[in-house]
Image (cartoon, rainbow, N blue to C red):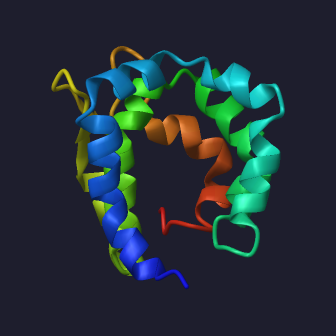
Amino acid sequence: ASDPALLAAALPALYASVVTDNPRMYNWLVTLPNQCIVDQGYIQPVAVILTEGTMFETIGENLPKLVDEYYNTGCTTAQFLAFVPVFLEAFNLPTAEQTNAIFQKFGTTPSGEQVRFTQPFNGGPSILQCVTPNLAILTSVFAIG
């Protein structure tokens, strides 16, 4: 049997090892045409299966909408990859503390640029601007707002 608390605790270190501290993986991920890949329709069925019966089920069901809104608003993969550790950290906190963590902490790109939830990144919008159309979906997982 799996231990969700143990998995949640291990995710930040795993992400750092596989993505953040791995330039080859990071560079590959940041250049993938993620929106096009999701729009092809292959990812969502897998996401639905993997999230079925979990608190992430709504996200799995709405993945194409979430991805389209994120990229169509102007946010980037580099921005998302840098901020994932903040989301992972916030997810491990009590619900009452998640909003503060998301709004106060920042992620860092491999080149050292800071990515904050509410600040524009590289002349584009903030992550908050890109997820605002889908806050109802995201608040099913995170306490945002």
Q: In which quarter of the image is residue 56?
A: bottom right
Which of 14 and 139 lies nearest the eye of the viewer?
14
Q: In which quarter of the image is residue 13?
A: bottom left
Q: How many labels does the image show?
A: 0
Q: Judge whether residue 117 can be spotted in this image.
A: no
Give left or right: position of 125 versus 15. Answer: right
Give left or right: position of 11 versus 130. Answer: left
Q: Position of residue 35 (x, y in %)?
A: 67, 24
Which of 67 and 126 lies nearest the eye of the viewer?
67
Q: Position of residue 52 (x, y in %)?
A: 76, 68
Residue drawn at 41 percent across, 71 percent down: 7
Give left or right: position of 46 versus 23. Answer: right
Residue drawn at 79 percent across, 27 percent down: 39
| Rendered view: 5 above or below 88 | below
Residue drawn at 61 percent across, 17 percent down: 33
Q: Quadrant of residue 119?
A: top left
Residue drawn at 23 percent across, 36 percent down: 21
Which of 33 and 76 lies nearest the eye of the viewer?
33
The quarter of the rendered structure image containing the N terminus is bottom right
The extreme front residue here reads 1
Q: Judge whether residue 53 can be spotted in this image.
A: yes
| Rendered view: 145 above or below 18 | below
